Image (cartoon, helix red, strand yellow):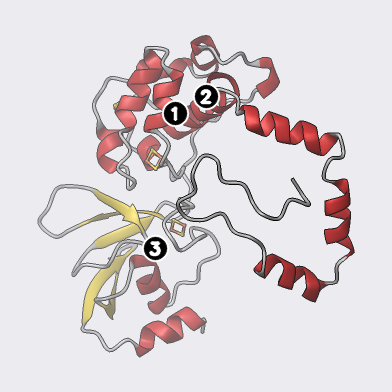
Amino acid sequence: MSTTTEEAKKVEAKLIPIYIMGKQYEVPETLTIMKAMEYAGFKYIRGCGCRGGVCGACSTVYRKPGDYKIYSGLACQTVVEPDMYLTQLPFYPAMRATYTFEDLQGKPEDVFTLYPELFRCVACNACTKICPMDVEVMDYIAALKRGDIKRAAEISFDCIQCGLCASRCMGELPQYHIAQLARRLNGAYLTPRAEHLKTMVANIQAGRYSDCLNTLKAMNEDTLKKTYQEREMEPAVAGEDWTPKEANCL
Ligand code: SF4
Ligand code: SF4
Ligand code: FES
């Protein structure tokens, strides 16, 4: 029995019935779907990653009694409800275009060529309705149809690649793969370069910090930890002209 299951069984909460893949189980009402499934005896090999709502591995769809709607959520974040009827979709097979990123140019045509199905979108909004991250999926698809890669990258920023949007799409779009391409293009071609980063990289390559780095590399683990813990920290509210007092590694 896993630790999580043991912990769940210690929970002194009212038991409620839920249906997991068609079979009824009694589970504590305080548990998330993920913990309830473990309580019921399921062991996660796939369909579980971070347990914190960020990896997108635990997409779950469910219905409630007497309600025609299909609901969705992340199993690690959604608390069980009485008589919910659920199943998990740990992976949704959506087509992802193959490309060599260096061959792209950051233009709308990159997206149009790799994902021509973009124009099959009929603006039904089913993707937005099912997204557990409240991403305006249809809006980022619409932005890409207009050629606005930057806007699509911004709107889709919270996407966790769970695939639920693709599962509902009547146009058969792999929305989250298209959005990922948009974010990559935006980051590589459309976002202004950070000049201070360029300067820092050049300084590193020129060996400006070699002595400092060699000193750190020569430290034993305890000294390294102590040095790290006692390092000078930038204050929470630092003015533009703040510079560290310790100047050895500047
Ligand atoms: S946009 Fe799609 S893949 Fe991304 S989080 Fe929303 S439903 Fe999941
Ligand atoms: S579900 Fe598909 S067709 Fe409907 S709005 Fe979203 S991308 Fe367009
Ligand atoms: S396990 Fe990662 S989002 Fe649920």
Secondary structure state at the residue bearing disc 3: loop
Q: Is residue 190 above or below residue 22?
A: above
Q: Is mark 3 within 8 Å of ligand 3?
A: yes
- Report x, y in % for residue 101: 66, 23
Say which amino acid is labelled 2: Asn
Q: Which residue is mark 1?
A: 153
- Residue drawn at (37%, 42%) of the image: 164
Dot 2 and dot 1 residues touching (CB under 8 Å): yes
- Residue drawn at (22%, 48%) of the image: 70
Q: Is residue 122 above or below residue 197?
A: above
Q: Which residue is mark 2?
A: 186
In the image, taking residue 196 as reference, residue 1 lies left or right, namely left
Q: Is residue 79 above or below residue 61?
A: below
Say which amino acid is labelled 3: Cys
Task: Specify which label sits upstream in the sequence, 2 or 1.
Answer: 1
Q: Nearer the viewer, residue 22 or 233?
A: 233
